[in-house]
Image (spheres, rainbow, N blue to C red):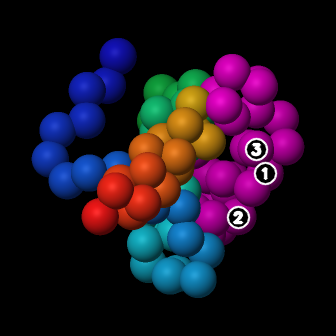
């Protein structure tokens, strides 16, 4: 089980291409079954965001809910500040 250490989980913000690529990569690492990096994308040229969109089409509801909850934590923090 991966334990994220370091920077916070990035926000889901498609308007920020670099940040959304980081978010997409992390969601795939956490929720898509994989044994090697090649399992996360169809090819090295495929964008991380595109790979995530494809995965979301087949992803189970439990994982989708966890991803939504991570985003809600960011929204709550924004409301608090």
Q: Secondary structure at mark 2?
A: helix
Asked if the magenta segment contains residue 56, the reply would be yes
Label 2, label 1: how far apart the Cα atoms are = 6 Å
User: Which mark is drawn over residue 56?
Assistant: 3
Residue at figure coordinates x 29%, y 64% from the top left: 81
Residue 10 visible, this orientation: no
> Magenta: predominant secondary structure element?
helix
Observer-side mark, 1 or 3, equals: 3
Q: Are marks 2 and 1 in contact (CB under 8 Å)?
A: yes
Q: Secondary structure at mark 3?
A: helix
Observer-side mark, 3 or 2, equals: 3
Label 3, label 2: how far apart the Cα atoms are = 10 Å
Q: Nearer the viewer, residue 79 or 1?
A: 79
Where is residue 1? Give x, y as percent.
35, 16
Would you call the spot at circle 3 few (<14 residues within 10 Å), some (14-19), or many (20 or more)? some
Residue 81 visible, this orientation: yes
Q: Are marks 1 and 3 in contact (CB under 8 Å)?
A: yes
Asked if the magenta segment contains residue 34, the reply would be no
Where is residue 27? Give x, y as percent.
52, 44
Q: Secondary structure at mark 1?
A: helix
Would you call the spot at circle 1 few (<14 residues within 10 Å), some (14-19), or many (20 or more)? few
Instruction: Report the residue marked by disc 2.
Output: 50
Residue at figure coordinates x 39%, y 62% from the top left: 78
Q: Nearer the viewer, residue 5 or 46?
A: 5
Q: Are marks 3 and 2 in contact (CB under 8 Å)?
A: no
Magenta-highlighted residues: 40-65
Residue at figure coordinates x 73%, y 44% from the top left: 55
Instruction: Report the residue marked by disc 1.
Output: 54
Q: Is residue 32 above or below residue 23?
A: above
Where is residue 21? Give x, y as percent.
50, 68
User: Which mark is drawn over residue 14?
Assistant: none
Q: Is residue 43 left or right of residue 71?
A: right
């Amino acid at each position: 089980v991966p334990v994220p250490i370091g920077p916070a989980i990035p926000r889901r913000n498609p308007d920020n291409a670099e940040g959304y690529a980081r978010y997409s990569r992390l969601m795939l690492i956490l929720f898509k079954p994989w044994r090697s990096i090649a399992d996360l994308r169809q090819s090295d040229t495929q964008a991380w965001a595109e790979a995530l969109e494809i995965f979301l089409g087949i992803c189970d509801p439990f994982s989708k809910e966890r991803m939504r909850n991570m985003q809600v934590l960011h929204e709550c923090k924004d409301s608090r500040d």
